[in-house]
Structures are given as structure tokens and as C-alpha cells.
Amino acid sequence: MCGRYAQTADMRELMEQFEVTGTSPQSSLPLNWNIAPTNPIYIIRAHDRTGNDTKSQKALATVSWGLIGPWLTDMQEARASQSRAINARSESIHEKPTFRNAFRSTRCLIPASGYYEWATALGQYRPKQPFYISARDGKQLPIAGIWSSWTSPNGEVIETASIITQEAQGELESIHSRMPVFMPPDRWDLWLNPRNTDVNELKSLMVVEHPESIVIARPVSDSVNSVANNGKELTVETPLGEPETLF
């Protein structure tokens, strides 16, 4: 489960790291150290949605976090459903009605400065101890995602996205059973290409050797539990008492 994350880079930094040469929003989103479901977020997607772009240009866009099911017809119900669809499981994404169409044709990258996870009772840390998990190299985490457009009864077009998750591996298992799917740069073009609809190939793109080696986890304070709290202090490491250790 990935229920909160941080994005502390501006548009310029994101466009540089992800080599965005296509369209981009007119203005940056505010820096956010505590992004919650239904909040506006950045995604990286194919600039040409037909898949005919031989240059594989990428676009930066802002959407709402939590995919709206394509069959929903009521605005209130659609908004309420978003919090239940912020994550899509990599093992079943190709089958679930909410996610399968987007998985086949409108995939994206969701850039994150880091994400939060809360320890479960199955690990070595106290239950509900929050951790901030970020890239070891200090760059943005390229998380695999899907996006979709939904049209409300009054004609408003709302674009939404979900993060794809997988079983946690390595030391991350000691915190939580799930983790986001990280997408290496050499797979971005294949992942984003709308014409790439082969489910088996798409599933293979989500298989990364030792994904836990990409990130480092740091315990942080319980302040992140409240969405009202927002600031870089949320990501500051909080020492754990003995005998707990951290990789």
C-alpha cells in the first residue's frame, strides 16, 4: 500500500530528469511533503496518445490521485471512489475492471521525492511506525502508474491516476508487505507507448531485480499521520530505540 508520498521538485526539475519535451502544465503544483488521496499530482505520460510518435516524446501533466472507474455516472460517487483506487496491484491490474483498460493503453510514471509507509505488526518495528522511503541516489523515484479520463454528467473531464504496487522485497518486507513498482529509465519508452498492449510484455516490464536496493528507509515522526501537517520536517529521520535497527 502506498497511501502518502512527497513531491518536493518543481516542474523544471521533473522535466529535466524525465526528459520531458512534450506538453507541460501552465503552472507548478505547490511543493507537498504529505500528498494524500484525491490531491493533485504530477504524472509523466506519452505526449502522443496514438503511439505514432517516433521520437517517444514525454509530457508532464497534473491529475487527481485515485482512478475513477469508467462505469461510474455520479460525480459524488466518483469522487468518493477515488480513495479506494489510489493503488493497483501489479498481480491483478490486467483483470480488475477499474484498472484493466488503463493498464492496456494509458500508462504513466508517477514521480515521487519519496513515499511513506507504516510498519505492520508482522515486522520488527512497532506497529504503525511511519517510515519515509526515498531513492538512494537522491533523485526522483520513477513509480509505475496508470491514468484515465472520466467525463462527469455535466461534461467536465477529470483525469486521474493510480500507483502500481507489488509485494515488498528484501528489508522493505520488515516494514510492510507492499511497495510501489519502480520503473527503470531504460523501460520508460516501452511502458509509456500506448500501442504497447501486450499484457505479458507489460507485466514483464514491472519485474525489477532487487527493487529494494533502489531505496533507503528512514523512520520519521508520527506527524505525517495528519494530512494537515506539511513540511520538510516530516521527512527528517527520527531515531529508533534499541534493539530496533534500520538498513
Image (tube, rainbow, N blue to C red):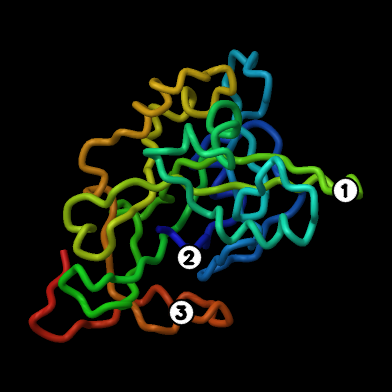
Residue lying at the far right of the rendered structure: 154
Residue at image position (66%, 54%) is 64
Q: Quadrant of residue 126?
A: bottom left
**Left or right side of 154 for 215:** left
Q: Which residue is mark 3?
A: 225
- Identified at 43% across, 26% down, the residue is 202
Q: Position of residue 4 (x, y in %)?
A: 48, 65
**In terms of secondary structure, where does tag 2 sit?**
strand
Q: Which residue is mark 2?
A: 4
Q: Is residue 193 above or below residue 36?
A: above
Residue 12 image position (x, y, % from top left): 60, 49
Q: Residue at x 31, y 51 (%)?
A: 137
For image coordinates 21% across by 42% down, the residue present is: 210
Q: CA distance from mark 3 to mark 2?
A: 9 Å
**Residue 57 in which image quadrant:** top right
Give the secondary structure at mark 3: helix
- Choose between 244 and 8: the one closer to the eye: 244
Q: CA distance from mark 1 to mark 2?
A: 30 Å
Going from N to C along the chain, the mark reached first, 3 or 2, is 2
Q: Quadrant of the C terminus?
A: bottom left
As shown in the figure, which amino acid type bears the numbered disc 1? Pro
Q: Is residue 195 above or below residue 145?
A: above
